[in-house]
Image: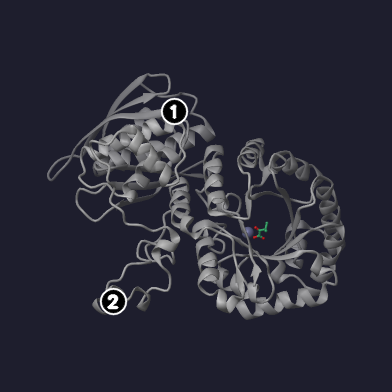
Amino acid sequence: MDRIVILDTTMRDGEQAPGATMNLEDKVQIGRQLERLGIDVIEAGFPANSPQEVEAVAAVAKEIKRSKVAGLTRPVLSDIDACWEAVHHAENPRIHVFISTSDLHLERMLRKTREEVLEMSVKGVAHAKKYTDDVEFSPMDATRTDPVYLYQLLTAVIDAGATTINIADTVGYAIPDEFARFLTGIRENVPNVDKAVMSVHCHNDLGLAVANSLAAIKAGARQIEVCVNGLGERAGNASLEEVVMAISTRRDLLGAYHGLDTTQIYRTSRMVSDVTGMLIQANKAIVGANAFRHESGIHQDGVIKERTTYEIMDPKSIGLTSSVLHIGKTSGRAGFRSHLKDMGYDMTDQDFSKAWESFREVVSKKKYITDRDIEAIVAEELRSVDETYRLDEVHVTCGEPGIPTASVKIVDSEGREFIESAVGNGPVDAVYNAISKVIPVSNTLEEFTIKSITDSTESLGEVTIRIESNGQTFTGRGASTDIIVASARAYLNAINRLVSMQGLDSKGPVK
Ligand code: KIV
Ligand code: ZN
């Protein structure tokens, strides 16, 4: 049995999903959780993108002790230097060099010849190699590249020192058996292939990213690149939880194993969803709300008699529990903090204090508290962003007949109070109009989702929104037993993210 190296690129390719932008604190939080999950290589970002990205990748690199930390870079010497500046803080740093190799990309996009790309690749790998032994090379759009040219290029970059060669199905074009043959071709025609680990990076445009990754394992790939919840460009990347649980469940067939603690999967999935605001569809394999729910009587009967009749995985193996907490109104801060720790949340004192306030508010209104409630409460703190604006009060009047009207009191980071009221098409619209009067940043609401955390009417309502401003997308989340409050919090959360990235309109808040 061979061990499969799992490279997680949620913080790099995953972040390329519209609206999934992560700030430094988000990345550190997710990095810690990925390490807890046992990820072998954490790709933390693309440092040459911006000085902020260098800082964020460096912060992850400083925090992570066991996993390797990789940064992505073009084979441009100054980009490689920026990448090293960020990842060198890690105990085990990796530089990941990539460049397009298909004729289509070369002719239409890079406007370079095959020879020029080969030369750049070799120089880039050699330059990275001066910094670290651990260098990964990715031919981008590899699956649409002339195989003979690819063999030549891979031979050259391995000679230059690449220790991992990552075959990227950049546009999700491959079909599993064809992809396996493509990889076999590489193994048979790249003479020095044994000097490097063969990796694959599959996109999901045809819904085949996981199938292609598994076919790759059978064809000899020993590193698989994945994203939590299948995040990533367009239709996303191979989903971490699906690849990993397929390896666990079918190691008999795949002849391979991984080194992850799968009981951290559910928590990781929730955290990434909460931090990015990217919701998980109910029927998503492994981590969707319905993944372990049985509806039909025959199935329920079977599972009660013997779980394995209709469950190929134990929900506990991904860390799914349905525990109702034994903490409530009378619980103290210490008990709550220790429960959060058991759940894997390591919070700063400041974030914990805010979570504690929210928890007190929820227990005063709700009889039973579940772990899911706690996750929704801390999710707001996890979406850590400088709170330029805080919602102090919100009131609405609505009904039939009547004009939905809202008033809000918002306090800014300097303690100034702003009160505004507005009407709207409905209570949420009225609240958003009132908030917009206080904070004059132009934006458009692109998506608004509301769901209840548990099944009862006293449940917490969780609102996720997506707003667009100057071509950038920002997500916001809010949770409360009152859905209007949750909606207002979600909007302010997104606005705070927007303001922290783009600054305020010159006018600042209006009185
Ligand atoms: O999809 C892709 O080709 C990539 C590479 C940078 C590995 O993300
Ligand atoms: Zn990709």
Report if residue 404 is visible in the image: yes
Amino acid type indicated by mark 2: Lys
Q: Position of residue 384 (x, y in %)?
A: 46, 37
Q: Secondary structure at mark 1?
A: loop
Q: Position of residue 228 (x, y in %)?
A: 52, 57
Q: Is 226 left or right of 444, judged from the image as shown?
A: right
Q: Where residue 275 is drawn, which disc sits there?
A: none
Name the quarter where the C terminus is drawn. Answer: top left
Q: Position of residue 90 (x, y in %)?
A: 68, 42
Name the quarter where the N terminus is drawn. Answer: bottom right
Q: Is residue 233 above or below residue 298?
A: above
Report if residue 168 is visible in the image: no
Amino acid type indicated by mark 1: Thr
Q: Is 154 left or right of 361, judged from the image as shown?
A: right
> Relative to the observer, which residue lies in front, 260 or 283?
260
Residue on which the image places disc 1: 388
Among all residues in the image, which is located at the extreme left? 401
Q: Position of residue 23 (x, y in %)?
A: 54, 39
* Residue for point 31% across, 51% down: 450
Sooner in the amino-acid sequence: mark 2 or mark 1: 2
> Relative to the observer, which residue lies in front, 4 or 449?
4
* Residue for point 44% across, 63% down: 317
Q: Secondary structure at mark 2?
A: helix
Q: CA distance from mark 2 to mark 1?
A: 55 Å
Ligand 2 falls in quadrant: bottom right
Residue on which the image places disc 2: 305
Q: Is residue 349 above or below residue 46?
A: above
Q: In terms of image quadrants, where is residue 226?
A: bottom right
Q: Residues within 10 Å of mark 1 (few under 14, many from 20)?
A: some
Q: Is residue 314 above or below residue 341?
A: below
